[in-house]
Amino acid sequence: MDTRGYIERVKDSLLFRKKKIVIITFFFTMLLFAVSYLFINYNLKPVSDEKIQVAFEVEEGQNAKQIAEILKEKNLIKNSLVFYLYAKWKGYDTRIKAGEYILSPSMTSQVILLKLVKGETFLEKVTIPEGSTINEIARIFEEKRLVKKEEFLKEAISKNYKEKFDFLKPIPDNAPVEGFLYPDTYFFPKNRPATYYIEKLIKRFQEVYYGIPEVKILEEKLNMNTLEVVTLASIIEEEAKIDREKPVISAVFHNRLSKNIPLQSCATIEYILDEHKEKLTIEDLKKDSPYNTYLYKGLPPGPISSPGYKAIIAALKPEKNDYLYFVSNGDGSHTFTSNYQEHLKAKNKQGKNNK
């Protein structure tokens, strides 16, 4: 027996086995690394693409692990352990700042973590009600101590924003961006210029309006541009007290426009007067202004307030009917009629001096 050869063969066999074990170990290590990477990467991605805003508070004394668990409970992150380990790996776990934040499930875990580390807290909740005029919006910002009303109104003119928003181009340079300051709830930091806040409101309008499916096709079908649609929507917003009537009131105005009949909207008179009146006088109706839809046919030069989503949809998608008139029933609803004789009957029945 060749003892030496046998020993060499055994050595070669052991070496082969070791190499095999190393290769297999390396393969499984790489596989484990790849799976871990994919798992971590997946769990750091946004929970959803829903761009909603969620208020989130980090309290004094809370640690990164507790914060991660609360973020998961609020459905802002996918995995609390991955978030915590990532924060620890980056050295951010001890640098998270207490405060109130506005986060979104559309943010990645990395973005959320950076906001918490940088202390990008919100300071003021600002709610713009539907149908607010630019003067009312400016007053809200002043009440929140974000910017003076005069400064807000001074900067809220179209020429300051036309470069970023093409839909403002039909508006004269020094005309206000009335109607394009979208009514919504916002969270704003303090100590920013008026243009910062105004631009945010206009950008929100852009997101909502151009997020409407086939909005440009709807505009073309109506032979209207964005300014005209928003102008009509603002009138609908002021006239309609009940959401279900908005498409009906929209139809009345569309029908009047197609027949070249003055819109005769009391809301446009109140805009001129800058006050709400239970009953308009004959003198009120004679106020000479391009916004007086009793004196001038067609749409006024621009919106009279900031319309909400339902009013905008109503302007784009009016109900199909032949109504030309409506009169208030005194409870927020209206009676709609197709001719002046029927309108007079409805008017007399209600005892109101409305359209």
Image (tube, rainbow, N blue to C red):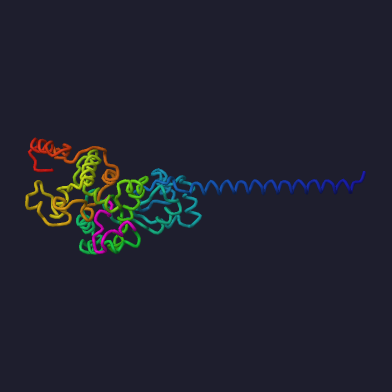
What span is in magenta? 166-183
Q: What secondary structure do most residues of the magenta stretch adopt?
A: loop
Asked whether residue 223 appears in the rendered view, the answer is yes
Residue drawn where x is 19% and y is 42% of the image: 241
Q: In this view, does 106 lie to the left or right of 267?
A: right
Q: Position of residue 156 (x, y in %)?
A: 25, 61
Q: Where is residue 201 in the image (x, y as percent from the top left)?
A: 30, 55
Q: Position of residue 217 (x, y in %)?
A: 36, 47
Residue drawn where x is 25% and y is 49% of the image: 307
- The verdict on residue 68 being magenta is no
Viewer-proximal residue among 303 and 77: 303
Viewer-proximal residue among 212 and 67: 212
Viewer-proximal residue among 173 and 222: 222
Q: Residue furthest front?
A: 259
Count the labels in the image.
0
Q: In which quarter of the image is residue 143?
A: bottom left
Q: Position of residue 192 (x, y in %)?
A: 30, 63
Viewer-proximal residue among 142 and 326: 326
- The verdict on residue 172 being magenta is yes
